[in-house]
Image: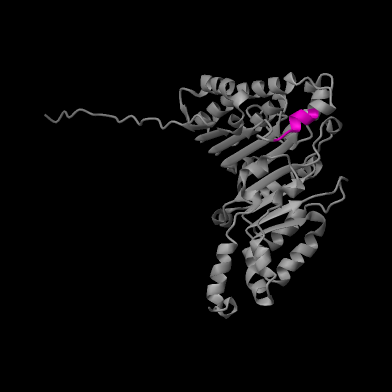
């Protein structure tokens, strides 16, 4: 039986490519929509790492696959980029996850993403960071929000670009936001949980520490100037929003932003904890919240969402809407009735939370032949 060490380089490289083909945890929608955590990249699959430890030859061949999907802490960015440059790995990096652990605003390097993109051009960038760092990426502040009332230590944003479009992309002059740094076409934003705030008197007056609070502060149909880069927002073709029981008035702010995503084709919402998550039960044990309030806010949010879906289907290019809250059986019947009352004319559902815009028949003009 032949020793694997005797295999030619081309065959060994092919074998390692199959081992390295396992998708990273950050490509799993369920992982991204769970409560934001620095453990987002944790995986039980370590086959490629184990192979790289066999010998120096295996390590060299496996390195490009190991670093196709990278994760680093922002405070170590310089060391990470130096390692990538030293080993010539830049062209192999497809995805980067940046973990920000700082709790002090202003303690990290400003515009750090410019340095990242000077060295790498990944298709996907995922950022797990405190809300004030997410706001810094959007070049806005959270001064008018009530951070103290919410238990939102982290939020997650994932950006995806089509590399084939970058040659025609020009960054707007004077716009240093992360959103305008690349021709992103897909954005996922996991805002975190609002449950802690429900234990406060008149909780609905509290403002969520989120860029959506700032971005949705004006109506895009009425304002002359908008608080976000319009060209970047309008370039998005997919937007995915996840939160845990946001107030309905906050959901309305999110919808104001979404209505200006004129090229959006895919939209999804998740407003309740995923199945198996016990955050609601734990919050009941430790706070004085009325358990009916979060569910009331969720139902009201879903009375607003289908109107924006219908609007984007008519005034925009939206063709697919999905709600992942269909997984929760107590919500399903009431949610279906609410959505169907607004969408039934032009949208078809699959009974699992997916709504697809119906293709309208094209009228064919007829003419009479008067030639005799």
Magenta stretch? 277-283
Instruction: Locate residue 164, reporting x and y percent.
Output: 54, 56
The image's colouring method is one colour
Which quadrant of the figure contains the C terminus? top left
| Residue 346 falls inside the magenta stretch | no
Nearest the eye: 345 or 198: 198
What residue is shown at x 82% (from left), y 27% (from top)? 285
Instruction: Locate residue 253, reporting x and y percent.
Output: 69, 29
Nearest the eye: 245 or 326: 326
Nearest the eye: 138 or 80: 80
Work out whether residue 115 can be spotted: yes
Main secondary structure of the magenta stretch? helix
Nearest the eye: 57 or 202: 57
What residue is shown at x 67% (from left), y 26% (from top)? 252
Q: Residue furthest left?
A: 372
Rendered image quadrant of residue 34:
top right
What residue is shown at x 75% (from left), y 45% (from top)? 37
Using residue 222 as the reference point, say whether residue 370 is left or right of it.
Answer: left
How many marks on residues? 0
Work out whether residue 262 can be spotted: no
Query: Compared with residue 116, is residue 209 higher up or lower down, i.e. above or below?
Result: above
Q: Residue furthest front?
A: 1
Rendered image quadrant of residue 224:
top right
Instruction: Locate residue 216, reporting x and y percent.
Output: 70, 31
What residue is shown at x 71% (from left), y 48% (from top)? 40
Instruction: Locate residue 293, reporting x and y percent.
Output: 74, 20
């Amino acid at each position: 039986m032949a020793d694997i060490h005797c295999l030619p380089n081309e065959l060994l490289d092919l074998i390692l490519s199959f081992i390295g083909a396992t998708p990273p945890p950050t490509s799993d929608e369920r992982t991204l929509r769970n409560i934001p955590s620095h453990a987002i990249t944790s995986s039980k699959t370590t086959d490629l790492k184990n192979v790289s430890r066999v010998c120096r030859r295996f390590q060299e061949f496996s390195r490009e696959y190991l670093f196709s999907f990278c994760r680093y802490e922002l405070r170590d960015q310089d060391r990470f980029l130096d390692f990538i440059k030293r080993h010539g790995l830049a062209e192999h990096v497809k995805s980067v996850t940046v973990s920000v652990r700082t709790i002090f605003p202003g303690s990290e390097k400003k515009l750090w993403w410019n340095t990242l993109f000077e060295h790498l051009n990944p298709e996907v960038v995922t950022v797990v960071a405190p809300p004030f760092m997410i706001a810094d990426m959007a070049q806005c502040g959270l001064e008018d929000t009530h951070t103290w009332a919410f238990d939102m230590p982290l939020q997650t944003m994932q950006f995806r670009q089509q590399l084939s479009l970058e040659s025609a992309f020009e960054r707007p002059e004077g716009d240093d936001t992360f959103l305008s740094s690349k021709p992103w076409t897909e954005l996922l934003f996991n805002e975190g949980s609002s449950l802690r705030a429900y234990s406060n008197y008149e909780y609905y007056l509290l403002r969520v520490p989120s860029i959506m609070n700032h971005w949705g502060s004006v109506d895009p149909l009425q304002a002359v100037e908008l608080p976000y880069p319009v060209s970047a927002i309008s370039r998005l073709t997919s937007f995915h929003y996840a939160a845990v029981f946001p107030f309905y008035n906050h959901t309305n702010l999110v919808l104001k932003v979404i209505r200006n995503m004129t090229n959006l084709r895919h939209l999804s919402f998740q407003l309740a904890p995923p199945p198996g998550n016990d955050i609601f039960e734990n919050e009941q044990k430790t706070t004085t919240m009325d358990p009916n309030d979060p569910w009331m806010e969720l139902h009201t949010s879903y009375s607003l969402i289908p109107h924006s879906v219908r609007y984007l289907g008519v005034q925009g290019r939206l063709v697919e809407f999905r709600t992942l809250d269909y997984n929760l059986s107590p919500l399903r019947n009431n949610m279906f009735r609410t959505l169907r009352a607004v969408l039934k004319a032009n949208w078809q559902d699959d009974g699992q939370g997916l709504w697809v815009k119906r293709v309208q028949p094209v009228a064919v003009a007829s003419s009479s032949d008067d030639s005799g």
